[in-house]
Amino acid sequence: MRSSALLSLVGVLILVACTSADVRRYDNSADAAGAGDGDAPEVSTGKEQAPRDSRLRRPGSDCPLTEAELAGFIEELMSVIADRDYEAWYEHLHDSYIEYFSQPEVLEEISEEAVLARRNVDLRSLEDYFQHVVVPSRAGKELASIDFVAPHKVKARTQSGGQEAVLFHLELSEGDWKISRF
């Protein structure tokens, strides 16, 4: 009898801790969104099969982060892109993403891709990359699914031309979800 009362008390404590956890970053009523992993959405071949889970863990907690909460955060990121808000987008970038897409040789290579070359776009900065690659490639896209790759990594997907395409990769970094390039 004593053990069932103890289990009930533990359950109540976990419930209280979870409901009082900071979920501001994952508020699914928020209306903003981040950027993709850079280039036009990556088309899925359907060959990679990421393990799906209906929830993740909040950092430093046993409280579940639901797919709906993560979808709200992704919608927040999508709104940032739609608003062409470079500063807000930049705040959601993982350090490795910033480092990679700021490299002059990477920007030059992307500038040579057909879509940008036809428009004579010469990318010289991460902000150019955001304005000429991220914004147009994510315009009008909607979140179709979330693939949980690992407890701290997810792929946000959309439907494009009848196929699934990756909108962006997100990685949990220092307690925040960041746009990454894993």
Image (tube, rainbow, N blue to C red):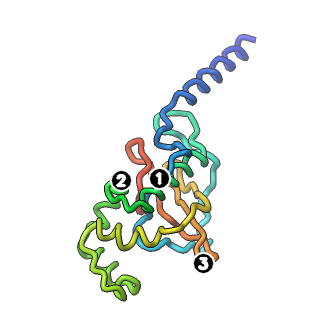
Between the C-alphas of marks 3 and 2, the distance is: 29 Å
Q: Secondary structure at mark 2?
A: helix
Name the residue tied to disc 3: 161
Whether residue 95 is visible, yes or no, is no
- Whether residue 5 sits left or right of residue 67 in the image: it is right
Name the residue tied to disc 1: 32
Q: Nearer the N terminus, badge 3 or badge 1? A: 1
**Residue 6 image offset from top left, x and y in percent:** 66, 15
- Residue shown at 47% from the left, 53% from the top: 32
- Packing grade of label 2 (10 A; few <14, some 14-19, many >=20) is some
- Residue shown at 29% from the left, 70% from the top: 128
Q: Are marks 1 and 2 in contact (CB under 8 Å)?
A: yes
Q: Secondary structure at mark 3?
A: loop
Q: Nearer the N terminus, badge 3 or badge 2? A: 2
Vertical relation: 121 (above or below) 148: below
* Quarter of the image that includes the N terminus: top right
**Residue 158 image offset from top left, x and y in percent:** 57, 66
Name the residue tied to disc 2: 88
* Residue nearest the observer in this picture, 90 or 14: 90
- Packing grade of label 3 (10 A; few <14, some 14-19, many >=20) is few
- Looking at the rendered structure, the kind of residue marked 2 is Ala
**Residue 137 image offset from top left, x and y in percent:** 46, 72
- Looking at the rendered structure, the kind of residue marked 3 is Gly
Q: Are marks 3 and 2 in contact (CB under 8 Å)?
A: no
Vertical relation: 84 (above or below) 46: above
- The quarter of the picture where residue 3 lies is top right
Between the C-alphas of marks 3 and 1, the distance is: 24 Å
- Whether residue 31 sits left or right of residue 123 in the image: it is right
Q: Secondary structure at mark 1?
A: loop
